[in-house]
Image (cartoon, helix red, strand yellow):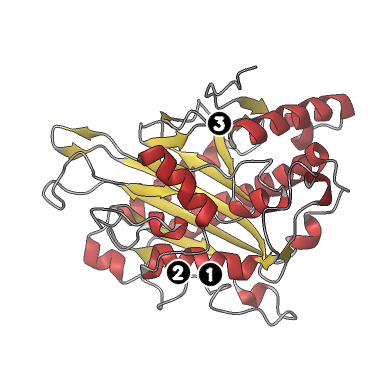
Amino acid sequence: MTEDVSFEVPTIDISAYVAGDDMDARADVARKLDVACRTVGFMQIVGHGVPTRVTDGLAEAMDLFFGQDLETKKRSTAPAGANRGYSAPKSESLSLSLGVESASRMNDFFEAFNIGDAASLHPGLDLPTSVYAENVWPELDARFETQVLAYYEEARRVAQTMTHIFEDALGLDRGFFEGVTDHSIDVMRMNNYALPEGTVDLDGDLTGMGEHTDFGIVTILWADQVAGLQVLGRDRAWHDVAPADGALLINLGDVTGRWTNDQWMSTLHRVKPPIVNGTIQRRRSAAFFHDGNFDAVITTIPSTVTESTPDLYAPITIGDHIAQKLAGSRQGKLNESATRDAERVKSALY
């Protein structure tokens, strides 16, 4: 028999986990999610319960910040090493986090603003402030912080709901993820893909955000319905993905891939924004990364290891794993530990 490698990002209604307790309905959601995680690693969710006024508020806040001039935005840059505040265009190269060197060495042109949980939220744990850094808030209308945090908390709730579904889909005891996420490295990155004409030389190789996998457990993505996001399918081709009305995009990260021995897919994706009349069409997104506890050790779930499928990964802490990834994307260091990821990228590109 020939393996079906057709590409589809399924839409899954998770309302049974958000607003109901029908166990049959929940079992159906978990089954659909399991199929999506094994075949594509991406899905759209509806029935998530995030109010439209909150997503509208997020979009308004992003417009408020990114609409400022570059020098003003740079005042919100965090100290070196802190995953917070403003990142200017062409300051990162995400493909390096996968151990892949770009032939052009042109860094990704998106700009971003990051917030996340700080060590001060967990006073008894002595967490590293380089990872759990304090937020850097711009001097803007107070609505910015209020609207961003309102969505941040909703996205965190959705991420926690997704991990409950993961437990059911994987046959894990309820509470498995709570034990490794009670001081999770949660970060939200607001992205803006638009540069004034003449800022960069536009050509066919322009990269908004280079091919990469996300680092943690699960990503909750709000995005404009503008072309640009592409996902690598099992057919080794890149496929365009855009959210349906009111939907959030969900994808798995490397930590979940490691836990499941790659039975669930941490899928490669990138952003190749459209160019219209020599100008990049604007695209906004906000990715909430639910990455897990800094000191949690990723060890393969025993049920995913068989004689025909040996354990693919050595144990590693989530903190060490993410540090290796960030050293690539932020510091320009090729991630030499990402051999499996690099092979996947090269098989698609060459």
In this view of the protein, which residue sits in the foreground, 180 or 316?
316
Q: Which of marks 3 and 1 is nearer the N terminus?
A: 3
Tell me residue 82's x, y (percent).
47, 73
Quote the CA–CA distance across marks 2 and 3.
32 Å
**Residue at figure coordinates x 69%, y 82% from the top left:** 126
**Residue at figure coordinates x 82%, y 39% from the top left:** 168
Which is in the foreground here, disc 3 or disc 1? Answer: 1
Tell me residue 157's x, y (percent).
68, 48
Quadrant hosting residue 81: bottom left
Q: Mark 2 points at which residue?
A: 327
Residue 304 vertical placement versus 113 (above, below): above
Tell me residue 218's x, y (percent).
62, 48
Mark 2 surroundings: few (<14), some (14-19) or many (≥20) residues within 10 A? some
Mark 2 and mark 1 in contact? Answer it, CB < 8 Å.
Answer: yes
Q: Would residue 188 appear left or right of 265 to someone viewing this image? A: left
Tell me residue 216's x, y (percent).
60, 55
Q: What element carries label 1?
A: helix
Which three-letter amino acid code belongs to the residue tagged 3? Ala
**Residue at figure coordinates x 31%, y 63% from the top left:** 91
Q: What element carries label 3?
A: loop
Q: Mark 1 points at which residue?
A: 323
Q: Mark 3 points at which residue?
A: 247
Residue 137: tell me if it is visible.
Answer: no
Quadrant hosting residue 294: bottom right
Residue at the far left: name it: 198
Which three-letter amino acid code belongs to the residue tagged 1? Ala
Q: For the N terminus, which image quadrant?
A: top right
